Image (cartoon, rainbow, N blue to C red):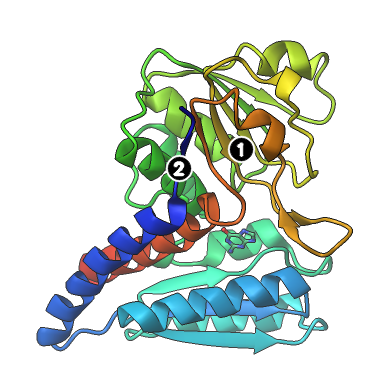
């Protein structure tokens, strides 16, 4: 029987626990503070940022959205980051990606105080994660590891194929799975014979944003399927990378879209904000 991995339910359990941690901190007079910087009007980013604000409120984290125009200069953005780095009430800083083309994204990520880098985008934190000495783990990969833990899916010795090599998801996830003893193959849009590789995976993880790119013939019988893709179909409905109806029967475990990885990303962000707060007090 295929098991649906219910990220929504698992994230609710995590959020409940985090709410308790925030309550304990508030009894000591400490309220975790998160600043989210949103530059420009990207539609998807606006939705993500609103969701982060909603969940922060739910848990008791003080979140502040810094909205900046699409015409913001590099200097203006850097100034805001320096102010937030120095603000003792702000324990976590997140710069929503993507940034407009005129902004040097790498420089911005490296200007956030590593202790407040709840996204784990700072080179120091990425380096620490690489050698298995992380204080923060990047939110989406951490959410996926949590799903494996909660559903008792073993990682050690497994053949994992990741489709997507982004700095936010594919690359850090590959590192984290290598650290857990998996054999990891990272594919991209230029990969030769993707089907040959994907159909050998014990765990297949797709992060492309191309609807239904993962068909049943790309999947090994009883594989674990993790779908990180989000796109909208012709009817405007949110869909993942996986041809869910056809892959479902072949998979041992599968994440739905929505309600799979998405809610876990925000739960892990909240976890990082609380961790950052504890590290700073
Ligand atoms: N844009 C898409 N995903 C993310 C994320 O996890 N963090 C940030 N800062 N921006 C994103």
With 205 as the anchor, is 263 left or right in this view? left
Of labels 2 and 1, earlier in sequence is 2
How many other residues sit within 10 Å of disc 1, few (<14), some (14-19) or many (≥20)?
many
93 or 162: nearer the eye? 162
What secondary structure is marked by label 1? helix
Residue 79, percent from left and from top: 60, 83
Q: Is residue 274 above or below residue 7?
A: below
Name the disc covering residue 170, or none. 1
Q: How many marks?
A: 2
Find residue 193 and report its image quarter.
top right
Residue 99, percent from left and from top: 73, 67
121 or 11: nearer the eye? 11
- Residue on which disc 2 sits: 5
74 or 252: nearer the eye? 252
Contact? badges 2 and 1 (CB < 8 Å): no
State how far apart marks 2 and 1 are (Cα).
20 Å
Residue 215, percent from left and from top: 75, 28
Q: Can you see residue 145?
A: yes
Name the disc covering residue 8, or none. none
Residue 279, percent from left and from top: 23, 64
Find residue 247 and report its image quarter.
top right
10 or 228: nearer the eye? 10
Ligand 1's quadrant is: bottom right
With 165 as the anchor, is 204 left or right in this view? left
Q: Is residue 116 above or below residue 57?
A: above
At a point 76% along the width and 74% down the height, the residue shown is: 43
Find residue 59 and report its image quarter.
bottom left
Q: Is residue 250 above or below residue 43?
A: above
What secondary structure is marked by label 2? loop
How many other residues sit within 10 Å of disc 2, few (<14), some (14-19) or many (≥20)?
many
At a point 44% along the width and 58% down the height, the residue shown is: 8
């Amino acid at each position: 029987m295929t098991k649906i991995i219910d990220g929504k339910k698992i994230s609710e359990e995590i959020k409940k626990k985090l709410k308790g941690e925030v309550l304990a901190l508030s009894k000591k007079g400490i309220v975790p503070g998160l600043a989210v910087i949103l530059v420009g009007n990207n539609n998807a980013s606006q939705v993500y940022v609103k969701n982060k604000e909603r969940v922060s409120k739910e848990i008791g984290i003080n979140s502040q959205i810094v909205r900046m125009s699409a015409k913001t200069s590099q200097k203006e953005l850097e100034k805001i980051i320096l102010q937030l780095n120095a603000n003792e009430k702000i324990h976590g800083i997140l710069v929503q990606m993507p940034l407009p083309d005129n902004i040097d994204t790498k420089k911005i990520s490296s200007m956030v105080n590593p202790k407040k880098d709840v996204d784990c985008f700072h080179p120091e934190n990425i380096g620490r994660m690489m050698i298995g000495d992380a204080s923060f783990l990047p939110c989406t990969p951490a959410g996926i590891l949590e799903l494996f833990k909660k559903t008792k899916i073993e990682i050690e010795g497994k053949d994992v194929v990741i489709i997507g090599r982004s700095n936010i998801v594919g690359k850090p996830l590959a590192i984290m799975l290598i650290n857990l003893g998996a054999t990891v193959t990272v594919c991209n849009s230029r990969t030769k014979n993707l089907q040959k590789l994907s159909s050998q995976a014990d765990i297949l993880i797709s992060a492309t944003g191309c609807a239904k790119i993962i068909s049943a013939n790309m999947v090994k019988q009883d594989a674990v399927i993790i779908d990180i893709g989000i796109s909208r179909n012709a009817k405007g409905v949110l869909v993942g990378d996986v041809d869910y109806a056809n892959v479902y029967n072949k998979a041992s475990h599968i994440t739905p879209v929505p309600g799979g990885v998405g809610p876990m990303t925000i739960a892990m962000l909240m976890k990082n904000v609380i961790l950052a707060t504890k590290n700073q007090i």
